[in-house]
Image: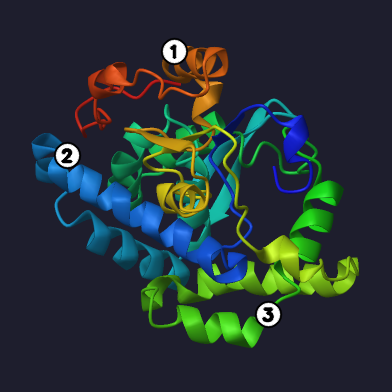
């Protein structure tokens, strides 16, 4: 859109990643803000709030408790076709929650997962991990074909991590993230800076970190619970796209267009006539997440 605008007729940005965000800081905050949205979403549901009161406090207390005394979960090893015992610490609970918020189908399970884990019951935790494919094997030989690590590190390191350093990120995050999560979240940030030093991808030209300014018709799709590219990032992208339209999908996580029943018609209509805002009436019919309650049966 910036380098070759004459070649681009119209654009869909699903779960957009604008180049002008401060990735090392905003990425970490996106994870925490997504969790906060989950807690607020449960609190707005009378049934969920009654079943899981003060969910945020329960989660933070459970992270601390698991760090002090790890739990044990039975996870399924897809390579060996058998279950194995795995230690669960606060980082595991936090990371599993974030990974599960990518998927519209696992989001309703998450308040129940926090509640059960707090009560030393790891059945829901195991089911969520199985559903997300986050930890498929003891040997970690399961390959996620949705991306390629070499390409990801090359682009992310060069375009995002060469403009700052870890100390700056740590200073910016400490007063924005609860104490119980600081070590977990800062670990991921520190790990990325170590990768940057190892990868030697260099630093992109300054313009690569600037907003894209364009009048090309653009449809921006965002998921309410997306922990990676939140709605705020789509709103930031929209600020410099004069012919842009943004729509938030209630109850969804990352990559809303991967769920055809909601986004396909809107995208098709937009590509047919990108100069007109597509019909979004049906978005009002998307329900809030139907959070699974303690007495409800869990599905494999």
Instruction: Please tell me which residue is depicted at 44% across the width and 12% down the height of the picture.
Output: 261
User: How many residues crowd around disc 3 within 10 Å: few (fewer than 14), some, or many (20 or more)?
Assistant: some
User: How many residues crowd around disc 1 within 10 Å: few (fewer than 14), some, or many (20 or more)?
Assistant: few
Mark 3 to mark 2 CA distance (whole Å): 41 Å
The kind of secondary structure element at disc 2 is: helix
Q: In the rendered image, which quarter contains the N terminus?
A: top right
The kind of secondary structure element at disc 3 is: loop
Mark 1 to mark 2 CA distance (whole Å): 26 Å
Q: To which residue does mark 3 refer?
A: 164
User: How many residues crowd around disc 2 within 10 Å: few (fewer than 14), some, or many (20 or more)?
Assistant: many
Instruction: Please tell me which residue is depicted at 78% across the width and 43% down the height of the picture.
Output: 139
Q: Nearer the viewer, mark 3 or mark 2?
A: 3
Q: To which residue does mark 2 refer?
A: 48
Q: To which residue does mark 1 refer?
A: 261
Q: Is residue 158 left or right of residue 235?
A: right
Question: Which image quarter: residue 294?
Answer: top left
Q: Looking at the picture, tell me which residue is in the foreground, 27 or 114.
A: 27
Q: Earlier in the sequence, mark 1 or mark 2?
A: 2
Q: Is residue 1 left or right of residue 293?
A: right
């Amino acid at each position: 859109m910036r380098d070759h605008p004459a070649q681009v007729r119209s654009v869909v940005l699903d779960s957009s990643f604008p180049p002008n965000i401060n990735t090392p800081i905003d990425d970490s905050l996106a994870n925490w803000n997504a969790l906060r949205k989950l807690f607020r979403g449960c609190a707005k549901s009378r049934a969920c709030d009654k079943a899981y009161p003060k969910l945020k406090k329960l989660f933070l207390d459970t992270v601390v408790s698991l760090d002090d005394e790890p739990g044990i979960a039975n996870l399924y090893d897809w390579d060996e076709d058998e279950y194995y015992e795995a230690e669960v610490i606060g980082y595991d609970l936090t990371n599993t929650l974030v990974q599960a918020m990518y998927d519209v189908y696992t989001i309703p399970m998450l308040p129940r997962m926090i509640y059960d884990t707090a009560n030393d019951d790891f059945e829901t935790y195991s089911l969520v991990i199985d559903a997300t494919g986050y930890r498929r094997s003891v040997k970690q030989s399961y390959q996620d074909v949705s991306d390629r690590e070499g390409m990801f590190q090359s682009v992310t390191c060069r375009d995002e991590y060469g403009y700052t350093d870890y100390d700056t990120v740590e200073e910016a995050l400490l007063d924005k993230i609860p104490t119980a999560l600081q070590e977990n979240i800062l670990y991921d940030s520190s790990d990325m800076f170590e990768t940057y030093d190892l990868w030697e991808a260099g630093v992109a030209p300054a313009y690569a970190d600037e907003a894209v300014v364009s009048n090309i018709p653009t449809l921006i799709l965002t998921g309410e619970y997306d922990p990676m590219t939140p709605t705020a990032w789509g709103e930031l992208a929209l600020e410099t796209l004069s012919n842009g339209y943004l729509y938030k999908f209630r109850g969804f996580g990352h990559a809303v267009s991967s769920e055809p029943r909601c986004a396909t018609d809107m995208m098709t209509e937009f590509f047919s006539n990108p100069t007109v805002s597509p019909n979004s009436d049906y978005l009002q019919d998307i329900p809030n997440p139907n959070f699974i309650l303690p007495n409800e049966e869990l599905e494999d």
